[in-house]
Amino acid sequence: MLPTVATSKARKYIVNILRQLIEERRASQAKEHDMLACLMRVDDDKHKLSDEEIIDLIITLLYSGYETVSTTSMMAVKYLHDHPQVLHELRNTTL
């Protein structure tokens, strides 16, 4: 699916909701046991996910339930494009 004005607006809307949820979660003292809590958990700085990475992962999961193979593949390619060091590591481990 090619991006359109409608999909662009929808993505911005979803991203804004997710940013707000992340901010509220960080401000809260409550201990949650859900996917967002797992993604936000910081065991060490080396594996800490940025807000953008958390948002991308959640959107990927949302879309993957809709168009499983094509969307997940597209997001994987986007992630590897945005993180060339991961692509390099992946190539070294699988080849």
Image (cartoon, rainbow, N blue to C red):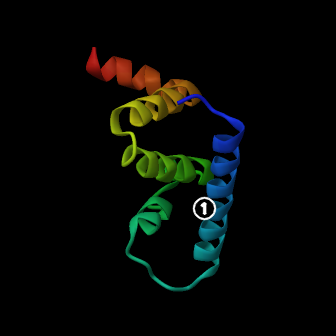
Crowd around label 1: few <14 · some 14–19 · many ≥20 (10 Å): many
Q: Is residue 20 above or below residue 88?
A: below
Amino acid tagged 1: Leu
Which residue is under mark 1? 18
In-front residue for pair 7/71:
7
Q: Position of residue 95 (x, y in %)?
A: 28, 14
Across and down, in percent, residue 71 comes to 44, 35
Q: Residue at x 48, y 48 (%)?
A: 57
Q: Can residue 93 be seen at all in this image of the molecule?
A: yes
For the point 61% across and 73% down, the residue is: 26
Q: Which residue appears at 58% of the width and 28% of the height?
A: 2
User: Could you tell me if residue 49 is visible in this image?
Assistant: no
| Rendered image quadrant of residue 31 | bottom left
Helix, strand or loop at mark 1: helix
Residue furthest to the top in view is: 95
Residue 15 x %, y %: 64, 54
On the image, the x and y values in percent for residue 16 come to 68, 59
